[in-house]
Image: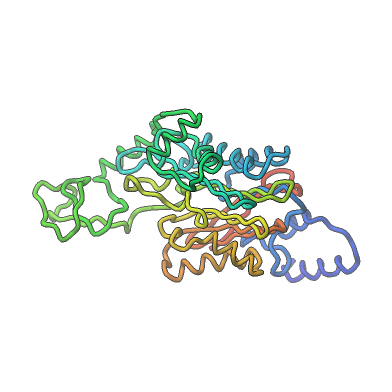
Amino acid sequence: MHFRDLGEQWYNLHHQSISMSAKSFVIIFLLPLFSVVVGNETVQSEEYPLVVSTWPFVEAVRAAWKAVDGGSSAVDSVVEGCSACEELRCDGTVGPGGSPDENGETTIDALIMDGLTMEVGAVAAMRYVTDGIKAARLVMQHTEHTLLVGEKASEFAISMGLPGPTNLSSPESMEKWTKWKDGCCQPNFRKNVSPANSCGPYSPTHYLQHPGETCSSTGHMLTTNSGLPRVGLHSHDTISMAVIDRMGHIAVGTSTNGATFKIPGRVGDGPIAGSSAYAVEEVGACCATGDGDIMMRFLPCYQVVESMRLGMEPKLAAKDAMARIARKFPDFLGAVVALNKKGEHAGACHGWTFQYSVRSPAMKDVEVFTVLP
């Protein structure tokens, strides 16, 4: 049966006043691209509560759903969902034990945002503390600040009762780092530099070449980022989650251990409000993932929510945000999920096939939606 025929069938059923639930439409009309439902409409949830997350992080969504369906607030439910992902070390890119930097250390970025109050708490490049999303909530609840960074963020989190200090590395992350070191620290995130030995220290390319350099048969090696798999099937970088609770309040949160082999001190889009996530109570929310170093320059989630505020439906708002980035960086990899106040949701992506997870009252369990570039 063609999609047009399905639309005509829906039209006839509608005008015969035959009642059919939104859940049935999701089952019948689910398509891989943006999960389109009849014409230009996006997927609509029956009612609150609602949980949406980047990627097939099904257990994280289940944890958030259990909390919000049990009466927890949107903020607390986001924390439960992201905490579950941190504990499970989702794809090795969330929580401890993954994504070593150039020194082999794992650090944490996280954010929580309350769409009702517009309060935000975030931590970045946090060392020695495993609970990124809980640390972000502590920043929001117990300081007038928005973002704490580095070892001072760790000290704050520990002083407020979180466990630590803890070594965030794992045997797997250290093995990955060792292999990278054995490969002359290539590829990496540096550009226009020349190393003084196989793994640095690095100098700008106009410096004279020093003797004793290795990993280059020509005696001169320029490091580039052309071959670095910054993001891919198993390096999504981020869980970004949105929750609408039973009261209709919206919150978003993120957690990540960042880009593998990043330069120490690097902060991506994970803890940046408006980039990895954004929520406005009367409009909706957005979740993002991908190449954070590029995406944070465009604040795609802020753009998505503001586009929906101006009346754009979620699918078009998501596609527009991706297109704005692609015009300047056609090779970037990224994705967003848009969610409006009605519970309608849609995704858009660029450079890869993207999946996101949803749980609503109309669903018996978490459903995963596939979005094609």
Asked which colour scheme the image uses, the reply is: rainbow
Based on the displayed image, in which of its 4 quarters is residue 9 positioned? bottom right
Q: How far from the left and from the top, in percent, is residue 279?
A: 60, 55
The reply, left or right, for residue 349 in relation to residue 235 is right
Q: How far from the left and from the top, in percent, is residue 109?
A: 45, 44
Q: How far from the left and from the top, in percent, is residue 151?
A: 37, 38
For the point 62% across and 61% down, the residue is 34
| Count of numbered badges drawn on the protein | 0
Based on the displayed image, in which of its 4 quarters is residue 295 positioned? bottom left
The reply, left or right, for residue 193 in relation to residue 292 is left
- Point out the image quarter for the N terminus: bottom right
The reply, left or right, for residue 250 in relation to residue 98 is right
For the point 60% across and 49% down, the residue is 114
Q: Is residue 27 visible?
A: yes
Q: Is residue 367 visible?
A: no
Q: How far from the left and from the top, in percent, is residue 203?
A: 19, 53
Is 23 located above or below residue 81 in the figure?
A: below
Of 70 and 57, which appears nearest the observer? 70
For the point 65% across and 58% down, the residue is 284
Based on the displayed image, in which of its 4 quarters is residue 154 positioned? top left
Q: Residue furthest front?
A: 144
Is 61 located above or below residue 347 in the figure?
A: above
Of 43 and 69, which appears nearest the observer? 69
Of 265 and 328, which appears nearest the observer? 265
